[in-house]
Image (cartoon, grey):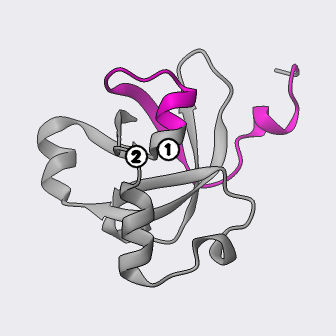
């Protein structure tokens, strides 16, 4: 768990263009993009915010230096569209998971 921040509009799209990748082909079902530590590049992840159902998958399409994690408690950055959907005005506390969370499979069943 850690702090989730967001990229300004168009930044993930520039990252995708600069890397010359087809993000949609990598993950056609992904609902957005996320930046994580470098070892997670290309993985599909789900984000779990306190008080909300987990969302995903997101495609890890950018990376950040490890010192950001250690010094700031940072764990992820989401794309601008996700930040707008979540009404983000600052960092949020999230949990990153690499498999679809169980409770997302069976909504209403605990």
- Identity of the residue furthest to the front in this view: 10
The residue to which callout 1 is attached is: 96
Q: Is residue 25 above or below residue 4?
A: below
Q: Position of residue 32 (x, y in %)?
A: 58, 51
Question: Could you tell me which quadrant the N terminus lies in?
Answer: top left
Q: At x 53% / y 38%, what residue is drawn?
A: 82
* Disc 2: which residue: 9
Q: Which residues are magenta?
A: 82-108
Nearest the eye: 102 or 5:
5
Residue 17's label in the rendered image is none
The image quadrant of residue 59 is bottom right
Query: x and y percent of residue 91 in the render?
Result: 32, 26
Q: Relative to 15, is 20 above or below?
A: below
Q: CA distance from mark 2 to mark 1?
A: 22 Å
Is 4 situated left or right of 65 in this image?
right
Q: Is label 2 or label 1 in front?
A: 2
Is residue 47 or residue 85 the one in the foreground?
Answer: 85
Seen in the image, is 27 located left or right of residue 92? right
Q: Is residue 58 magenta?
A: no
Q: Dot 2: what SS? A: loop
Q: Does the magenta segment cover residue 102?
A: yes
Q: Crowdedness of circle 1 by 10 Å Cα count: few (<14), some, many (20+)?
A: some
> Looking at the picture, how far across and down is residue 69, in whole percent?
22, 47
């Amino acid at each position: 768990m850690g702090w989730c921040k967001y990229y300004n509009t168009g930044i993930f799209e520039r990252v995708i263009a600069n890397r010359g990748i087809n993000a949609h082909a990598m993950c056609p079902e992904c609902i957005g993009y996320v930046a994580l530590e470098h070892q997670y590049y290309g993985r599909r992840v789900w984000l779990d915010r306190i008080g909300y159902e987990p969302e995903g998958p997101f495609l890890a399409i950018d990376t950040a230096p490890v010192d950001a994690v250690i010094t700031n408690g940072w764990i992820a950055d989401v794309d601008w569209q996700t930040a707008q959907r979540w009404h983000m005005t600052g960092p949020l506390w999230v949990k990153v998971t690499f498999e679809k969370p169980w409770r997302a499979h069976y909504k209403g069943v605990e």
